[in-house]
Image (spheres, helix red, strand yellow):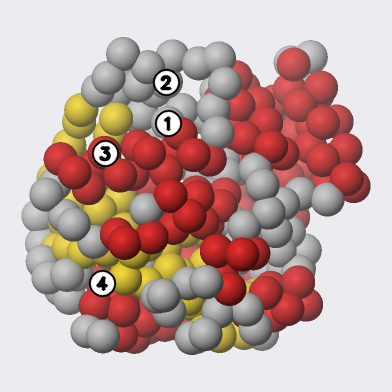
Amino acid sequence: MKTQRKYAGTERYPVIAWQRTGSGPAFVLLHGFPENGDLWSGIVPALAPHFTLIIPDLPGAGESTYAGPHLTMEDMAAQVAEILRLEEIPEAVIAGHSMGGYTAMAFADRYPGKVTGLALVHSGAHADDEQKKETRSKSIALLRKGGKDAFVRQMIPGLFSAGYRAAHPGVVARQTERGLQLDAGAMIAFYEAMMSRPDRTEVLRRAAFPVQWIIGREDTTTPAAQALQQAAMPDVSFIALYEDCGHMSMFEQPAQLAGDLLEFGRYGNNR
């Protein structure tokens, strides 16, 4: 199916870029950090025959820009809402990977009537605890001192399970190179946005839509125990626990992820 690359812009967000492909009910895919919308390229072929896919580059990533200086999850959620307005899409299933999941949570908090399903792919609703904030603060300090390359080369391999890292060093290397393309200023803005996000577990408890959980047994960024605890909060949860998988199931177990998203998307759009 043909993929359309689309653009819009505002004073604060001079370029808002997204991809549209497929046909059928709407399904939004939000990337994590330090990625862009191309993160989902391996999943798109399985979903496009069934859904109209909207795949943004979040502000500061890929081809999307922002005027700064600060960025919040609410800002990114508002840009997703603007894309849906421009596409004349009143509601959609929203899937978010990691930081994209935090954005999806902000979207569901602010625009609950636009959400027919929420898929959290290695993500969750909790705010950063103090230890996580301290770790992010140290990373920000390193980025401000010009240590972007060292930061990315240390961080990206840790997103994958040990077994996958050993078996697929080329994939890990390619993702590391992709991460290096992101501007250090955008990295800092994203980390600050993640540090300042509020706890949104109450959004899960009051959700009038189903919530999907994609959980990697070996995920050290979003630990399985933490995700499973949150999965008990919504009235309707779809839980998929992936063995031998870290934080990057779109590479580590793409067929399983595509199948689970397809099943959930059908459920969310046919209630």
- Establish if 84 lies above or below 93: above
Q: Is residue 160 left or right of residue 266?
A: right
Query: Residue tagged by mark 2?
Result: 66
Please name the residue shown 55% across and 64% down the image: 203
Give the CA separation, mark 2 to mark 3.
Answer: 14 Å
> Which label was assigned to residue 59?
1
Whichever of labels 2 and 4 marks the residue nearer the N terminus, that label is 4
Whichever of labels 2 and 1 marks the residue nearer the N terminus, that label is 1
Secondary element at tag 4? helix
The residue carrying pointer 1 sits among few (fewer than 14), some (14 to 19) or many (20 or more) residues within 10 Å by Cα, namely many
Kindly report which numbered mark, 1 or 4, lies closer to the viewer in this rendering.
1
Q: Is residue 87 left or right of residue 217?
A: left
User: To which quarter of the image does residue 243 belong?
Assistant: bottom right
Image quarter in which the C terminus is found: bottom left
The x, y position of residue 21, in whole percent, is 16, 56
Secondary element at tag 2? loop
Secondary element at tag 1? loop
Tell me the kind of residue under disc 2: Tyr
> Which label was assigned to residue 47?
4
The residue nearer to you, when weighing 177 against 211, is: 211
- Mark 2 touches mark 1? (CB < 8 Å): yes
Whichever of labels 3 and 4 marks the residue nearer the N terminus, that label is 4
Query: Residue tagged by mark 3?
Result: 82
